[in-house]
Amino acid sequence: MMNLTAQTPAPTTPAVTGLTSVEAEERLAELGPNTLPEPQPPSPLKVFLVQFRNPIIYILLLASALSFATGRIEDALFIFVVLLINAAIGTYQEYSADRAAAALRKLEQPLTRVIRDGAACRIEAKRLVVGDLVLLESGDRIPADLTLVDAIDLRCDESLLTGESMPVAKGRTVEGSSDETRSSMLLLAGSLVTRGRAKGVVTATGTATMLGGIAAELGRASSSQPPLVARLAKFTNALALFVGLAALVLVVAGFMRGLPLHDLVMMSVGLAVSAVPEGLPIAISIALAVSMRRMAARNVIVRSMPAVEALGSTTMIATDKTGTLTSNVQTVTEIRLPDGTDIALDAHADLDRCEIRASGLDGDLVRERARRLLRAALLANEGSLVRRDDLWLAAGDTVDVALLAAGRKAGLGQEELNDRYPLAARIAYEPEHKYAASFHHGSDRIHVFVKGASEVLIEMADRMDVAGSAVEIDRASLLAQKEEMAARGLRVLAFAEGEVGATLDGSLGHGHLVDLVFLGLAGLQDPVRPEVRQAMKDCRAAGVDVVMVTGDDPRTAAAIARDAGLGFLASQVVSGHDIDEAARAGDQRLDEITREARIYARVQPAQKSAIVASLIRNGHIVAVTGDGVNDGPALKKAHVGVAMGLRGTEVAKESADLVITDDNFASIVAGIAEGRAAYRNIRKVVLMSVATGAAEVLLFMLALPFGLPMPLLPVQLLWLNLVTNGIQDVALAGGRPEGDELAGPPRSPLEPLLDRLMIRRVVQSTLVIGAGAFLAFQWMLAHGYGVPEARNITLLIFVMFENVQTLASSSEKRSIFSVDILRNRFLLLSVLAAQTIHISAMYVPWLSRTLGLSPITPLEWGLSMLVASSLVFVTEADKLVCRRWRGRSPRVA
């Protein structure tokens, strides 16, 4: 095991009050930010040279050398210039992608809780300085090397640094060497808090931490190649083999006809470049990168590029409730005393108005009993609510803050209570316990206050408070009250108190929660986000099922789900207990439940993971949300793990593929729409690239048996594919969404990219473009055009065919003449740019001579457009048939 103290600076005497903002800024300016050195990106020269590491480029360089050796200097220079331009464009695209990735990483900057100016607040971890007092809880990643000031049941995972697989206990006295004792009080940057709460003073930041000492070994792993890119790379290789055989046939046939060897070799090179879409993986990466940027603008940060592709086929979203479907603005609206007395709190009252409304002769007694309940709520509380410059500043869990606000309305202050009842020990809330407790010194005894899930505390308590007296608890009555409140959509918490003897053997803990008096219930309201209902409708239209997985009571969950627009039957609400029983009966029984269930309530993290696994076995492509440290397994098991950016722990974020920065369910749905749009753009680029390349091969295959000269020169083929076509490929890859991505069901994950529709469109375009260009070339030769003039016009016809194919590929179902396509300015500009570049080349002496171009008449331009427009009629007819067919049987989106 690594020595934990070897590289850790000696701790300073901690100042437990924290720093002021002025002190922190001074130390930040002196010591620098709390960051590790990032790997230096490759230099522009290196990126430029990498663009030449491609088999197709090697072939072109060989062709350039061959042209130079045979005296065709202009051809050699043209090929070399085209390669330089292509490399420059590739360098720019890769540089832009690196900058975009860096911008996305900045959006991922972790936050940490500190005490500044005497109040708890969240700051960027990179702004931590030595001397800062940091607050930690389970799920946090430790942002710097710390010395513990206080710890409650603290366990840390230090496997990243030490290789120790089991969490390490911290904050307790260790018998043995001084190094062991010291290690228990040190928290190391990069390790994870798996359990408990802690306060610690920063002793080292950035490169001075132990993690900084080994930062070179912990560089950010490069993103894995998206599966779709890998599949298309295999497709490109297979196509290259086919084209190689076709080129060999053409070379042999041409050689037998006595054509010059140089022309045959250059023709083969041109065909290889035209038919093999070697730029396709790059174009697809561009499509995914553009989609990632768009998702970031819609509050979805993509941590794993393959997740963009997976979103397009998501069939099930397993979402939590609090903060995702709801606003996560908890407010205590009702207090229910054990005898059934209701006390309403004004949800919108100013915190400076401190009152509880009670009616009847026992009004004073009721208020006192309510204050007793709220006293427990404020003492068994880890949040804070302080006044600063006429503003209330809140920190901590939203439920804790809501209870503090309710206490203020009752005239109770957390600071005064803490002074009156000094803290002796605390049991932090953990999901497996479902309660939190605190022990406080009284005049002669230890007082204990507990808050937690109502059914848990009802079972734990022995007595209940009725009219100020402790009587035997009536569990059935209390459970009925809880059920009634939950049925109205309230989140219900319970409170209890007790006493512990003044003389204690051992430390205070769970075993001392005995002889508790039940104080009552509090109902908290968390309204559904207004945009969630429309998002639910979008999911139904998109064929995406939604299930709710929550730790709340079944009735509360059902009420919130109903308000959110999630349709379900009473039989589709199941509990964590039901999941456990089904799991014990076997996977088959669990799968039967998950096929029907729509709401999972009182679910533990381990049960959530089992639910996700079962949904996957049932054939769903699952996106699951999570925010806690124990949600990691479920997030990793899902096809798309979605972490909450606001309330999510670092463990959840690192386990996820996506991070939702606003914790909003609607943002997840927006991400699905963007994922589908990205997949559509990929299909558009594939259709464009494969169809035009195959058409060029067909053109030469038709010319060969008819004894015609080469329809296009090798340099013309290079011009066609590396210049005019490349511009339009990028436009298709970065095309904006069509707007109807959520109007149909998700695609099957088994659906091939080249499905029946794509294959039909490729064959149609290949036949129309290849045969149309061949017939035009043959007609011109038969009517007195010289070979150079016929090639000149044939090349223009091919450019126009590419223009039409680009417009036709911009949507699989919409007409070329639709308003949406005509408003796509970037696409139209790319078509106009390709046409303008080609016509301009006719008037540039060196370029026109090298490419064999010459100016044409308006009549020839018009006739060329007429030939190219034949593709419009074919594609429009096919789209019309598809639209009518979809009207009867919608196609997978």
Image (spheres, rainbow, N blue to C red):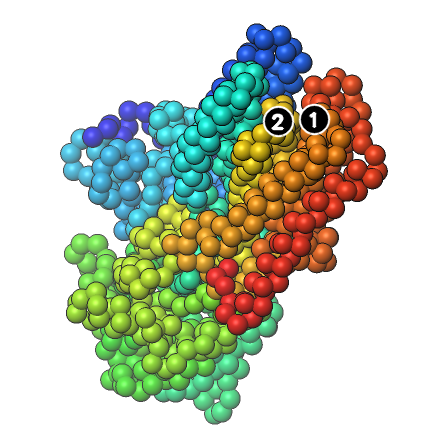
Q: Check disc 2 and give the amino acid type.
A: Pro
- Which residue is more in the foreground, 357 or 879? 879
Q: Position of residue 641 (x, y in %)?
A: 40, 53
Q: Secondary structure at mark 1?
A: helix
Q: Is residue 654 visible?
A: yes
Find disc 1 in the rendering and name its residue.
Answer: 787
Locate residue 513, reporting x and y percent. 24, 66
**Residue in the foreground of this view, choosing between 519 and 856:** 856
Q: Is residue 208 above or below residue 429?
A: above
| Residue 684 appears in the picture as rendered | no
Q: In the figure, is residue 884 to the left or right of 193?
A: right
Q: Residues within 10 Å of mark 1 (few under 14, many from 20)?
A: some
Q: Quadrant of the N terminus?
A: top left
- Residue 4 left/right relative to 149: left
Instruction: Give the left or right position of residue 801, taking residue 19 as reference.
Output: right
Say above or below: 493 vs 656: below
Q: CA distance from mark 1 to mark 2?
A: 8 Å
x%, y% of residue 106? 53, 39
Query: At numbered mark 2, what does the secondary structure look like: helix, strand or loop?
Result: loop
Q: Residue at x 55, y 65 (%)?
A: 743
Three-letter amino acid code at the position of disc 1:
Val
At 38% from the left and 41% from the top, the residue drawn is 142
Residue in front for this viewpoint, 630 or 881: 881
- Count of numbered circles in the view: 2
- Structural crowding at the residue carrying mark 2, measured as other residues with C-alpha within 10 Å and reported as few (<14), some (14–19) or many (≥20): some
**Which residue corresponds to mark 2?**
709
Label disc, if present, on residue 756 of the rendered structure: none
Q: Are marks 1 and 2 in contact (CB under 8 Å)?
A: yes
